[in-house]
């Protein structure tokens, strides 16, 4: 079996194009994040997740695909960052838009009481809840003021105030669905 290895290897020009495109796209993403802010890749909401997936896909496609030029890839990246900026402004200015785009936080425990219907809505198991309580150093349900399934998918455990500490601020639960 005679194999001509030179024919099996990609052309040097293709490798150079992928490397140069990769560096340019990478630096462009860094520049766009510096302009737009770190929120571009934060774990905040579904539209942030869509942004992250979109940027990754565009980076890979632009680097590897012969059918997508560097200019097209950069235009796609610019479109994503501009769209994210516009959505950010609309979320801040219009509460109705904010509620339509973002997931609402959901109460999983109200004090010592586990809200099983809300666990089911959030698709969180009691094992998940138990693990999060251990992670938050909860030794007894009496220490729990609230457990919230955040719009980002994180679970926050709010403790009762210790003796001498200021009381719990109800504002922290204003946007939480019960």
Image (cartoon, helix red, strand yellow):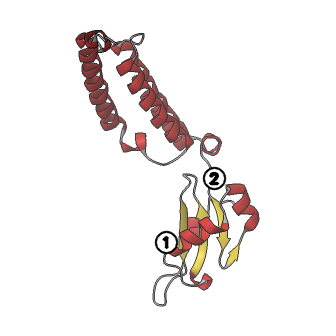
- Disc 1 on helix, strand or loop? helix
Q: Earlier in the sequence, mark 2 or mark 1?
A: 2
The residue at 45%/34% (across/down) is 85
The residue at 27%/15% (across/down) is 17
- Disc 2 on helix, strand or loop? loop
Residue 116 seen anywhere in this rendered image of the structure? yes
Real-space Cα distance between discs 2 and 1? 23 Å
Picture disc at residue 67: none
Picture layout, residue 66 above or below residue 59: above
Q: Quadrant of the C terminus?
A: bottom right
Picture disc at residue 104: 2
Q: Quadrant of the N terminus?
A: top left
Mark 2 surroundings within 10 Å by alpha-carbon count, few (fewer than 14), some (14 through 19), many (20 or more): some
Depth order, front residue of 131/87: 131
Q: Which residue, given by chain and number where applicable, does mark 1 sit on?
A: 135
- The image position of residue 121, as x and y in percent, is 72, 56
Contact flag, marks 2 and 1 (Cβ < 8 Å): no
Depth order, front residue of 75/94: 75
Which quarter of the figure has residue 18?
top left
């Amino acid at each position: 079996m005679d194999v001509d290895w030179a024919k099996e290897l990609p052309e040097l020009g293709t490798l150079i194009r992928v490397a140069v495109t990769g560096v340019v796209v990478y630096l462009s993403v860094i520049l766009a994040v510096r302009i737009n802010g770190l929120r571009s890749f934060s774990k905040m909401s579904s539209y942030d997740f869509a942004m992250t997936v979109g940027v990754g896909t565009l980076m890979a496609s632009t680097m590897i695909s012969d059918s997508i030029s560097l200019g097209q890839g950069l235009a796609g990246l610019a479109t994503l960052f501009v769209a994210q900026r516009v959505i950010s402004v609309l979320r801040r200015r219009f509460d109705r838009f904010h509620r339509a785009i973002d997931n609402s936080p959901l109460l999983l425990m109200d004090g010592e009481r586990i809200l099983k219907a809300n666990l089911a809505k959030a698709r969180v198991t009691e094992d998940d809840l138990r693990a999060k309580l251990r992670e938050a150093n909860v030794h007894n349900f009496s220490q729990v003021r609230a457990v919230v399934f955040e719009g980002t998918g994180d679970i926050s455990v709010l403790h009762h105030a210790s003796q001498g500490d200021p009381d719990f601020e109800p504002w922290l639960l204003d946007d939480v669905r019960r």
